[in-house]
Image (cartoon, helix red, strand yellow):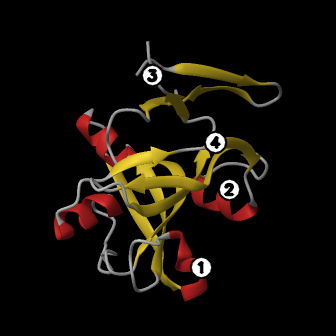
Amino acid sequence: MPACYERSTGVGSFVAVPPVRHRIDDGEASLSESMARRGITVRHRVLAITRVEPDRSARFPDCDGGAVEFRFIRYLEDEPWSVGTVALPASLAPLDWDGSTSVFAAMSARHELSIRRSERAFRAGPATPDDAAWLGIAVGSALLELELRGHNADQHGRVIATVAHRIRGDRAEYVVGLPQ
């Protein structure tokens, strides 16, 4: 990637890491698979794996047994990219997920599912103190927020995941192809 320089009055010039372009219409279930296919190293630091109260698991009407939420920090080429939360039906959740692959890759392998993104909605928002600490940015920095309205579905059309990410605005560029 070509180097970019950023100047701040009274601070000086420094090399700025250019944003990484991500196609969300590439047929993959996760940014992790998309980037790995392009040769970009992705890793996850697992923050928490939590069972969700039964009344909150109604988001998966085709699956029984509640839900499990996975909270993690995602790194691209060792740079923090996002703080994420993925909720899955408990019956499909890989409770031993260690972050070495995406949670979707772990689930797909275990249950022979073909998982794809089915909906995404983004908005801008400021970094909270927790976001800033985890992502190495200033409080209030611009983030792209992918809220829990993001869904993934399996090959049968069942919604089997909700996703939410708080993505560094200075590191991400999203691209979507439009039908001709």
Residue 121 in percent (x, y) is at 61, 43
Query: What amino acid does circle 4 point to?
Result: Phe
**Which of the two labelled residues, at mark 4 and mark 1, occupies the earlier sequence position?**
1
Helix, strand or loop at label 2? It is helix
Residue 11 circle label? none
* CA–CA distance in space, label 1 to label 2: 28 Å
Do tag 3 and tag 2 residues touch (Cβ < 8 Å)?
no
Q: Nearer the viewer, residue 22 or 74?
A: 22
Label 2 packing within 10 angstroms: few (<14), some (14-19), many (20+)? some
Residue 177 circle label? 3
Q: Nearer the viewer, residue 3 or 121?
A: 121
Label 4 packing within 10 angstroms: few (<14), some (14-19), many (20+)? some
On the image, numbered disc 4 is attached to which residue? 122
Do tag 3 and tag 1 residues touch (Cβ < 8 Å)?
no
**Image label count:** 4
Residue 56 circle label? 1
On the image, numbered disc 2 is attached to which residue? 132
Looking at the figure, which quarter contains the C terminus?
Answer: top left
Q: Is residue 46 left or right of residue 95?
A: right
Query: What amino acid does circle 3 point to?
Result: Gly
